[in-house]
Image (cartoon, coloured by chain):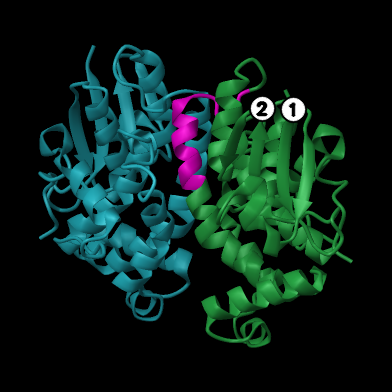
Chain colours: A cyan, B green
Amino acid sequence: MTIKLYELCGADNKMVFSPHCWKIRMALAHKGLSYETESVGFSKVATIEGGEGRRVPVLRDGDEIIEDSYKIALHLEEKYPDSPSLFNGEGGKAMTHFVTAWSQSQLHPVVARLVLIQIYQSLNDEDKDHFRTTREKTFGMTLEDFGATRGASSTDLHKVLTPIEAMLADQPFIGGQSPLYADYVVFGALQWLRIFKGQSLLKKDSKAEAWMNTLLDMYDGEGRNAVMAA
Amino acid sequence: MTIKLYELCGADNKMVFSPHCWKIRMALAHKGLSYETESVGFSKVATIEGGEGRRVPVLRDGDEIIEDSYKIALHLEEKYPDSPSLFNGEGGKAMTHFVTAWSQSQLHPVVARLVLIQIYQSLNDEDKDHFRTTREKTFGMTLEDFGATRGASSTDLHKVLTPIEAMLADQPFIGGQSPLYADYVVFGALQWLRIFKGQSLLKKDSKAEAWMNTLLDMYDGEGRNAVMAA
């Protein structure tokens, strides 16, 4: 049965950048599963697979349609138990929630501020309108004002990654001796950043930089070969 | 065989406050193990069990002496496999390192700033000298200046607990449906704070407050019954 991953893209439909979609790209590679992809712009996400109000990533696996990156990872874990585990047990499943909560609440806001304007610039006209309207409603100000007043710097990024850097003094991956889904959760946010910046903003010669480079090269360079924003 | 836990105490040797020792108190309770304790002041820690440069907690289990809270937890997990797991698998063991790295690098500095002067005041004269000398060397300023210029507020505490609050929207414990050692890692820091402040500084009616209250009441109120600083 065919697995199909719906992703978010810019005006160039090969430039897929959503951190949540990258989590699942890496999870599928981890499981050694082949799949096809379809990328859609912001204004088309809600109606993927005949849906209403969907959010990416959406995975179709045979007759099943799964939404939400953690639920997709759980689905892959349960449906393909013979390929390498994404969690290494129930404790790992549970603690992935903490890693995700940390990533979403601490790392994502910094990355989002670093890439906000570049995301907008990468979109086609219809998606530009959609992105501007929805984000300006959330922010209560224009994208440009938000970028100017709430921007972030690479120093903010290095600071927010302190727990990752400290953890990497103990072991090479969040998952221990090899990566688990929790690694891809954090990787997704940094890949999102990398695609828009065209380079790593991680601290030079840091453990986090080495960890990221290792993940970028895994699975035949799945992450390294991403199409970058123009 | 007898298990003995060496803890850190104030002038009142029943007032045991080290966050790392509280991790192990909770881990021992989780495992349902009985043990005896001996509490020592700062200036006596290094020479526990004939050691040189030891740090609390130190656990003697029969002929084995184990130092470092994570290593002690691993020891309990391996030696007492029939009692409830502290990690629920290898993924849980690995991700405990991330929870610990987060707690040490983000939560501990805030708590330490909130309780610094109260720690000092709780000690006997010999330990007061030891604490002042070692800390002032680290800070490069007097305890009082550090407290005045690098203090923290309960607002800082609430902000730093954002990932815990977000995670608790998904599940009742870091460990999932019941606590694991990773919960006790964070609990230890907040118990340290509670013992010196005599009350909870957690955000009223927050999920973190409810989680803390649940942990305080577990194991016949092991945490709730702590002797508070005067």
Q: CA distance from mark 1 to mark 2?
A: 6 Å
Horizontal and vertical percent position of residue A184: 32, 40
Horizontal and vertical percent position of residue A21: 29, 40
Span of residues in magenta: B85-99
Circle 2 residues within 10 Å: few <14, some 14–19, many ≥20 = few
* Residue sitting nearer the eye, A202 or B66: B66
Residue A145 image-quadrant placement: bottom left
For mark 2, name the chain: B
- For numbered disc 1, what is the local secondary structure? loop
Query: Label 1 is placed on what type of residue?
Result: Thr
* Residue sitting nearer the eye, A40 or A81: A81
Q: Any magenta on residue A181?
A: no
Residue at which label 2 appears: B62
The rendered magenta stretch, by its main secondary structure, is classed as: helix
Residue found at x 58% / y 43%: B69
**Is the residue A220 above or below the residue A194 in the image?**
above
**Is the residue A170 above or below the residue B130 in the image?**
above
Position of B148 with respect to B87 (left or right) is: right
Circle 1 residues within 10 Å: few <14, some 14–19, many ≥20 = few
Residue found at x 75% / y 32%: B29
* Residue sitting nearer the eye, A134 or B208: B208
Residue B169: tell me if it is visible. Answer: no
Residue found at x 83% / y 56%: B15
For mark 1, name the chain: B
Query: Label 2 is placed on what type of residue?
Result: Gly
Residue at which label 1 appears: B2
N-terminal of the pair, mark 1 or mark 2, is 1
**Is the residue B111 above or below the residue A90 in the image?**
below
